[in-house]
Image (tube, rainbow, N blue to C red):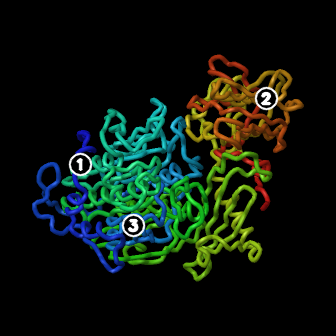
Amino acid sequence: MTPPAPRGSARLSRPLSGRALILPLLAALMLVSDLPAQVGMHVGTNLQGVTPKRGRVRMRPKPKRPNIVVIMADDMGWADMGVQGSAFIKTPVLNALAAGGARLSNHCASAASCSPTRVSQLTGVSPSSLGFLAPINMDTRRGIPSDVFTLPEGLNKAGYTTGFVGKWHIGEDHGPDSAEFLPPGVGFDWSARLVFPPVQSQWDPTVSINEQTQVQTTGHTTDVITDYALDFIDDHAQDDQPFFLNMWYFAPHLPAEAPQEYIDMYPGADPDATWTKYSAMVTHMDAAIGDVMYRLDAHGLLENTLVVFTSDNGGALNPGLHPSGNGPFKGGKGDVFEGGLRVPFIGFWPGVIPSGVVNDSLTVTTDIVPTAFALAGIKNSSPEWQGENLYSALTRNQRVARPEMLFWAHNASPMPLKPASGILQKFAVRQDETYVGGPDWKLVFLKEQIALFDITTDIGETIDLKGQYPGKLQELWDAYWTQHRPQAFFSWSEGGSHGSVAPVGAGGFPGSGYAFSGGAVALAKDARYDVHDGFFTAQMTVRADAVGRQTLLHKQDSFELYLDDNNVLQLMVQGQDGSSEQLSDSQALLPGQSYDVAFTLQRWASPLSENGLTLYVDAVAVDTGSIVAVQANRNTLWLGSDDQPALATSPLAGVITDLRFSVSALTPEELVGSWPAIP
């Protein structure tokens, strides 16, 4: 696709009423704050004389499978549109789409923050199982691992053309090693990714086209994203195969910056107030979505296109935002209360999804993947998927039966002090039994506090029921540690052995490993094996058969776990600022005896200070320390040697089995296969 000329300024110079009048119904809706529930909408009336910006419209026969457009807002709360209760924010397009389609009123993001939810939308699996427990920063060198099957990859195989446009935030460009984390590496045929500078702005973004060309654009990010999306629709409207368009807006994420014409839509409100600008950003995005709907209709595609609108997490509660909170819900972005998880979900597909459907089944972001694959005719389901097909809920208003529990985990740092429980994650467990006439249970854990709610009768999460139902509390607590938390472990994959190395044990892990005698194993590069975001655990069972300097695990410029000349266990960790920290055991490991060895990194203060290190032997902490921030990289991880095998530096004479990595800082209980008691 040829990148369009930047048109943000030209778009903004066009009067809002002129754009809205493309769709007469939407123009009328712009004049009122709410849409009567009984009003339906078909976004394709009175389009005589209107053509898309390139060429003439040629209606085409419908393909057998529908086009799919997924639109995701950034930090937009459940109650930030009129159809779900906002008396202030103007969202006539979204109101109309909800009235003309289906609204899932009990829909939750897969995480309480940006990056994890976006990962789940493209993979259909719990984001924490892929190592995403919080938003990644721009320096993080990780993303969706290359061996994970994604939504665009599946749709590609089914004959779809796939396109991405907008904010990415699930893997940045750090050179050749990061190519797998960018849109083409995840499976998109075409992409226009916003490239964020160190200081984010809503204006004049740089856009990376197919990760080959960077274009400096002019205008608001909402307009830039929409323009590229319209180009994608134009370029593929006449194709024989269907398309999948994934649109991730940056709005209404901070900074609160909106075009003046949308701020002017809120007369009487303080034009400089953050809340006014935030609301204007939502209205701006709403109008842009109207442009997308018009373009689909102008090409005759609406009746064969499923359009989904949702958000990545609940509304942020920064100063000046959401003065009344997230509607009826407690908390906001970053919280595992409903205010941080509950988000809008609208499905629109004229002639297939009836008008005015409101379904209160518990649904989640991961449901998008199995739904899209079913529509594309992909019958094979992945055992890793943690979602349900929503087709019947959207088209027939059927209740979604969800027998499995849902889990949310979020890194709870920064903390001023490490909690006594040693648990550094916020988490929630949801067990919806309403489809069989029971409660909708939810466990919430925050640092040392735990509560049990029935969402059916207490949507604001104000009545703690743990005293009345201790058995249910224990059931959900145990389920988190036994069903969900173990997904954070990743057994290693061997990327090549050198020297004298022999496999031991039955094939596969855990329980197998390698016997070393002057050799080493290079572990295949995988982002999940790298230190990121201040949370990491490496663990293994070690038997040294000799005495002397021997390396167990080594990542150049990051960390080394080794035995010194006296067989005393040592851990050396390097920081991003050039500092280092050395931890050591107080006694030697005896030759020929097996020990369970582990070390954890846990961020219990700010990201750049007081990252705690703990060295364990047989689940007992033998030394602790701290470091500013561990040096993260994509260097090869060596097992049994501290450098390139050809140098044979400090080779291990012994056996290593049961090597595992976790994206969490595990507690001593977890290291021995158990889990903490309820605090």
**Residue 270 in the image, given as x and y percentages of width and height:** 43, 56
Q: Amino acid at mark 2?
A: Gln
Q: Amino acid at mark 3?
A: Ile
Q: Amino acid at mark 1?
A: Ser
Q: Secondary structure at mark 3?
A: strand
Residue with the mark numbered 2: 570
When the figure is inspected, residue 389 is found, relative to residue 485, above or below; the finding is below
CA separation in Å, label 2 and label 3: 55 Å
**Residue 7 in the image, given as x and y percentages of width and height:** 24, 43
Tell me whether the residue at label 2 lies in contact with that at label 1, contact meaning CB atoms closer than 8 angstroms.
no
Question: What residue is at 66 percent from the left and 40 percent from the top?
Answer: 606
Direction from residue 533 to residue 665 in the image, left or right:
right
Q: Secondary structure at mark 1?
A: loop
Instruction: Give the number of the mark in front: 3 or 1.
Output: 1
**Residue 214 in the image, given as x and y percentages of width and height:** 34, 33
Residue with the mark numbered 3: 346
User: Which quadrant of the rendered structure holds the N terminus?
Assistant: top left
Mark 1 crowd level (few <14, some 14–19, many ≥20, 10 Å Cα)? few
